[in-house]
Image: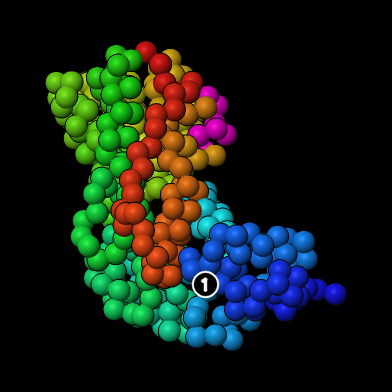
Amino acid sequence: MKATINDVAKHAGVSIKTVSRVINNEPSVRQLTREKVQAAVDELNYQPNLSARNLAGTKSFSITYVYDNPNAYYVIDMQEGILSACRQQGFELLIHPCDAKNANIADEVVNMVKHSRTAGLILTPPFSEMPEFVKRMTELDVKVVRIMSGDIAPDELTPCVMVNDREAAQTITQHLIDLGHKKIGFLAGDAEHMSTIERYKGYRRALKANDIAFDKRLVVEGEYSFESGVQGAKQLMSASSADDITPTAVFSCNDEIAAGALFAARLMNIAIPEQLSIAGFENSPFSRQTWPKLTTADQPNKEIAQDAANLLIAQVRKQESKTTTSQYIPQLVVRDSTSA
């Protein structure tokens, strides 16, 4: 028969309430007692019914991930990272994909919160970068943690996990410059995402630091998609040679765009990297599934998501956290898609 919380309490020689505190990872339990209860849980293979626990008590043991992102790899990494933290801390995860462009999106999420008994929200771009939306969420009886692009939090509305896209983009662009490239194209992602703006700033900063004149004709607006990369690369590489703006290297705002650019180059019989160097961003599976494999910046999305979830759960439990803001700087990964 399946072990119950009563069985665990009897086996460990403690009260049911103490077992509950250990399972909920509450800080007010002595380490020796915690180890004794955990040993009983492991020996009896006890698995708490989290859904029943949510319904039975006044305290919620679930958090919700709210997102609108076309990049499936990003979403999967985020879900896996958050789930890892939830499993370790005895929480459940609710997934709420939605349309950030919906005029009534704030009302939609507010209604979801009121009916789901969630204890907190993790917001990723573009929701985390919409101040009015965030303010609506903070007015609810839930905790909120945001994952955002930048080096410092823009306000004190909620705890944040920051991703320093600007510095990473500058490093990628500098890598291309160090290889001898001066005409470097920039394929942008969605304009409403702060990551696009920050990566563009890093690109510009690297050009300026090396006294390379900025040419806006080398910048192509787009979206975080493979198709956008295809169209952007075609636009850049189809420029008239008389205009003297054909790039020898391209910095793409993510790996999906870079993979599209590489595909377009193939269609145009442009050798990679001999005639054109291409770099991406994020180190998603796209960067390793292309040939040649893409130079990129390793953005540890699972780790970022796990950090955000642990920060949120600490807020829910009113545990003191050493910091309410953490920062990640994606690191350059050099592969075969870039050369002199």
Residue under the point 36% across and 62% down: 320
Q: Position of residue 107 (x, y in %)?
A: 35, 80
Q: Residue 289: which quarter of the image?
A: top right
Q: Is residue 120 above or below residue 69?
A: below
The foreground one among 295 and 48 is 48
Q: As drawn, is 245 to the left or to the right of 128?
A: left
Mark 1 neighbour class, 10 Å CA radius: few under 14, some 14 to 19, many 20 or more: many
User: Position of 118 compared to 151: left or right?
Assistant: right
- Assign a secondary structure to mark 1: strand
**Percent position (x, y) of residue 214?**
16, 29
Residue depicted at x 71% and y 69% = 12
Q: Is residue 251 above or below residue 36?
A: above
- Part of the protein shown in magenta: 286-292
Q: For the residue marked with disc 1, what is the amino acid? A: Ser
In front: 163, or 247? Answer: 163
Q: Position of residue 236 (x, y in %)?
A: 32, 31
- The extreme right residue here reads 1
Asked whether residue 306 is in view, the answer is: yes
Mark 1 sits on what residue? 62
